Image: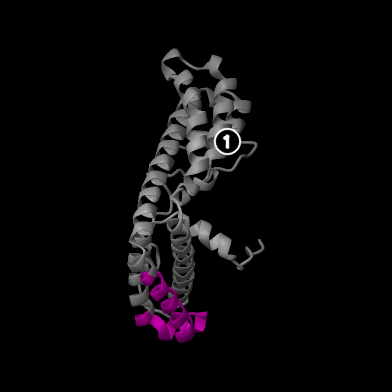
């Protein structure tokens, strides 16, 4: 399988940064900096030596300066991230309810099973589209479902959830004037630090697996930046000809 293009634009970094609170990014970066300094000798062979760490520290210093000089932007962003997490959690709760309602009839209906597997989102990025797809499946198969499954309530909720998820990444920029520019700068450096930490963690895990670094794999993971707004994410599901059998093994 070909690797993804490693090039990341400033726009992409900004989009990544919008997902996380700046204080959480700073805490994650601080812990990453400590283990990077400790393990720099081993990590150099993986491209994460002294020069890379100096560049990371320069971005971290800029990030700290932005947080200190622009507290209104930090506060605005913190609230937007909290709201986004709430909306994503509500979206996944909706998916859990609909998925559970459709599982029983899907065990005896190949077409429904295939449609259900294809509609279930794999991650936060696919949540909006997944809700829309599941709502269609739910509406199409409404007659097969019991009266107490609250199908009409779920269908009525779907459009509002999709609208909220579509707008939530941009809510951080709804303030006026300078705060908008300040928050955009924070987004950019939040994204830069996230990518630095991701690359450091990948290098660290490689070094550990190859015996070049003696540390626990759990050290080189994210500790404060959530991977998903889903409190109990399902593993990715791949649609196959045996979709019914696959559904039978899921919770």
- Residue that mark 1 sits on: 119
Q: Is residue 251 visible?
A: no
Residue 205 in which image quadrant: bottom left
Q: Is residue 30 above or below residue 148?
A: below
Closer to the camera in the image, 243 or 117: 117
Give the position of the C terminus as an image quadrant. top left
Q: Percent from the top left, x then y, of residue 162?
A: 52, 35
Q: Percent from the top left, x then y, of residue 84?
A: 42, 45
> Can residue 46 be found in the magenta stretch?
yes
Residue found 39% across the figure and 54% down from its top: 77
Q: Percent from the top left, x then y, of residue 239?
A: 61, 39
Q: Which region is colored magenta?
A: 37-65
- Helix, strand or loop for the magenta stretch, by majority: helix
In the image, 219: left or right of 196?
A: left
Residue found 55% across the figure and 44% down from its top: 126
Residue found 46% across the figure and 76% down from its top: 207
Q: Is residue 86 visible?
A: yes
> Can residue 44 be found in the magenta stretch?
yes
Badge 1: how crowded within 10 Å, few (<14), some, or many (20+)?
Answer: many
Q: Is residue 229 above or below residue 191?
A: above
Q: Percent from the top left, x then y, of residue 38?
A: 34, 81
Give the position of the N terminus as an image quadrant. bottom right
In the image, 76: left or right of 159?
A: left
Q: Is residue 94 above or below residue 61?
A: above
Residue found 44% across the figure and 34% down from its top: 96
- Residue at the farthest front position: 177
Residue 204 in which image quadrant: bottom left
Closer to the camera in the image, 65 or 179: 179
Q: Which element carries disc 1, helix, strand or loop? A: helix
């Amino acid at each position: 399988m070909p690797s993804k293009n490693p090039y990341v634009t400033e726009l992409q970094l900004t989009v990544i940064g919008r997902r996380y609170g700046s204080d959480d990014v700073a805490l994650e970066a601080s812990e990453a900096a400590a283990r990077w300094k400790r393990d720099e000798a081993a990590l150099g062979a993986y491209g994460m030596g002294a020069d890379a760490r100096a560049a990371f520290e320069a971005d971290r210093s800029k990030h700290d300066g932005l947080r200190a000089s622009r507290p209104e932007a930090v506060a605005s962003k913190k609230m937007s991230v909290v709201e986004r997490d709430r909306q994503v959690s509500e979206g996944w709760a909706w998916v859990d309810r609909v998925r559970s309602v459709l599982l029983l009839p899907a065990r005896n209906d190949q077409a429904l099973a295939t449609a259900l597997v294809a509609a279930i989102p794999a991650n936060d990025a696919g949540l909006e589209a997944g809700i829309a797809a599941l709502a269609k499946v739910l509406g199409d198969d409404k007659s097969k479902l019991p009266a107490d499954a609250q199908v009409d309530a779920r269908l009525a909720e779907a459009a509002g959830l999709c609208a909220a998820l579509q707008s939530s990444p941009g809510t951080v920029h709804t303030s006026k004037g300078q705060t908008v520019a300040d928050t955009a700068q924070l987004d950019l450096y939040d994204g830069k630090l996230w990518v630095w930490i991701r690359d450091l963690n990948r290098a660290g895990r490689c070094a550990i697996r190859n015996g070049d670094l003696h540390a626990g794999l759990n050290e080189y993971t994210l500790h404060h930046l959530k991977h998903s707004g889903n409190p109990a994410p399902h593993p990715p599901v791949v649609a196959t000809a045996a979709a019914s059998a696959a559904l039978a093994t899921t919770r």
